[in-house]
């Protein structure tokens, strides 16, 4: 199982819990019916999301989104507010860029800096 499969199945569980709390009359049977409509098969005497592909789980999540599930988590911080970068990190990024301009670094991008830092 890939990380994407696991992530999508976790999202499916989160949406199921959301629906049971937010949608009147929603229960486990409604959830299993929704899964069956999007391609889930029976495993161990019940309809299981583990039999679904990522595309099928994505379609089920889209169905939940049409029912009102807020796909994007809203945080308490103000929208559009940029996080402050610590001075030490911004200094490292500037130095990395200057090393690139001087020809000492082949790839002066932030991704290359992250790869270098991880090594």
Image: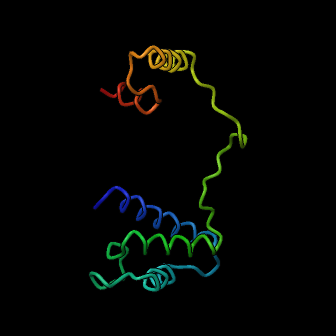
Answer above or below: position of 86 versus 15: above
Q: Nearer the viewer, residue 15 or 38?
A: 38
- The tally of labels here is 0
Q: Residue at x 67, y 33 (%)?
A: 82
- By what rule are the colours in the image chosen? rainbow
Q: Is residue 37 left or right of residue 81?
A: left
Q: Pinpoint residue 70: horizontal percent, then vertical percent.
A: 63, 62
Q: Residue at x 34, y 28 (%)?
A: 118
Answer above or below: position of 81 versus 46: above
Q: Nearer the viewer, residue 108 or 56?
A: 108
Q: Is residue 77 left or right of residue 47?
A: right
Q: Residue at x 46, y 29 (%)?
A: 109
Q: Pinpoint residue 116: horizontal percent, then vertical percent.
A: 35, 25
Q: Classify residue 8 by image quadrant.
A: bottom left
Q: Pinpoint residue 84: horizontal percent, then vertical percent.
A: 63, 26
Q: Nearer the viewer, residue 81 or 109?
A: 109
Quarter of the picture holding the C terminus: top left
Q: Nearer the viewer, residue 20 or 13?
A: 13
Q: Is residue 12 left or right of residue 67?
A: left
Answer above or below: position of 57 versus 78: below
Q: Classify residue 5 by image quadrant.
A: bottom left
Quarter of the picture holding the N terminus: bottom left
Q: Residue at x 63, y 74 (%)?
A: 66
């Amino acid at each position: 199982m890939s990380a994407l499969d696991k992530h999508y199945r976790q999202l499916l569980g989160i949406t199921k819990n959301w629906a049971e709390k937010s949608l009147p009359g929603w229960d486990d049977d409604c959830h299993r019916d929704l899964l069956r409509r999007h391609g889930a098969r029976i495993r161990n005497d019940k309809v299981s999301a583990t039999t679904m592909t990522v595309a099928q789980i994505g379609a089920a999540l889209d169905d939940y989104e049409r029912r009102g599930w807020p796909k994007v988590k809203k945080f308490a911080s103000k929208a559009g507010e940029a996080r402050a970068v610590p001075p030490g990190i911004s200094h490292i990024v500037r130095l990395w860029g200057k090393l690139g301009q001087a020809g000492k670094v082949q790839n002066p991008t932030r991704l290359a800096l992250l790869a270098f830092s991880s090594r």
